[in-house]
Amino acid sequence: MGARVARLFRNFNLENRVHREIGKAKPEAAPRHQTHIDPISDAIHKKNDPLLGFLKSVYVESKDPTEVMMDYLIKEERRPLISSLPGDPYGIVEIIDVPKGKLSIIEALQALNNHKNAPQTWTLDKVALEYSLDLKDTKALLEHFIPFEVKIIPPKTEDAKKIKDI
């Protein structure tokens, strides 16, 4: 009921109020600032004959690369994948080879894990040779990346609460 009363007061004498508002004098816009034309901007838009002559004297020749050159650019050396995940994980297309000098994520984790477990057998040189990497990149990989290590800490006392199997 309150909405009906509010609507009556809102719409009361609406047409007269609208005409009164339209009939009021409009506020004037603020005056515009005067623009100054710089001599530099004037010079930019004028034709400069010496520069135009230099531009006309420039001649560029280009040739398409030959097929042999294109084959070399397109074909990069690749090596077969050493290790991969079993099956089709997460619907990702299985990778069968990678460019030389690069690793897949699985190979990187495998190389890091091998070096961590047996650093005497999996030396810097052997990892670089096995995965076709540069020594500099292999050194940075083995020095700065460490695979996760899961440690399960047993409780200190027998009185500690344990979760029982249901």
Image (tube, rainbow, N blue to C red):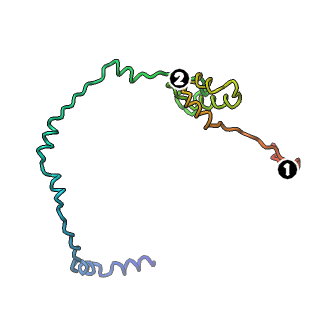
Spot occupied by residue 5 in the image (x, y as percentages of width and height) = 41, 80
Q: Position of residue 59 (x, y in %)?
A: 18, 32
Q: Residue at x 57, y 34 (%)?
A: 90
SS label for mark 1: loop
Determine which residue is flagged by label 2: 96
The residue lying at 49 percent from left, 25 percent from top is 99
Report if residue 166 is visible in the image: no
Q: Residue furthest right?
A: 158
> Mark 2 is on which residue type?
Ile
Q: Determine crowd level at label 2: few under 14, some 14-19, many 20+ residues with C-alpha closer than 10 A.
A: few
Q: Position of residue 154 (x, y in %)?
A: 81, 43
Mark 1 is on which residue type?
Answer: Ala
Is 139 drawn above or below residue 37 in the view shown? above
Q: Residue at x 58, y 22 (%)?
A: 129
Image location of residue 135, percent across then percent down = 56, 28
Q: Earlier in the sequence, mark 1 or mark 2?
A: 2
> Residue 63 or 105: which is nearer the viewer?
63
Residue furthest out toward the front? 50
How many numbered discs?
2
User: What distance separates the C-alpha of mark 1 from that of mark 2?
Assistant: 50 Å
Residue at label 1?
Answer: 160
Vertical order, 140 against 132 (above or below): below
Residue appearing at x 22%, y 80% in the figure: 24
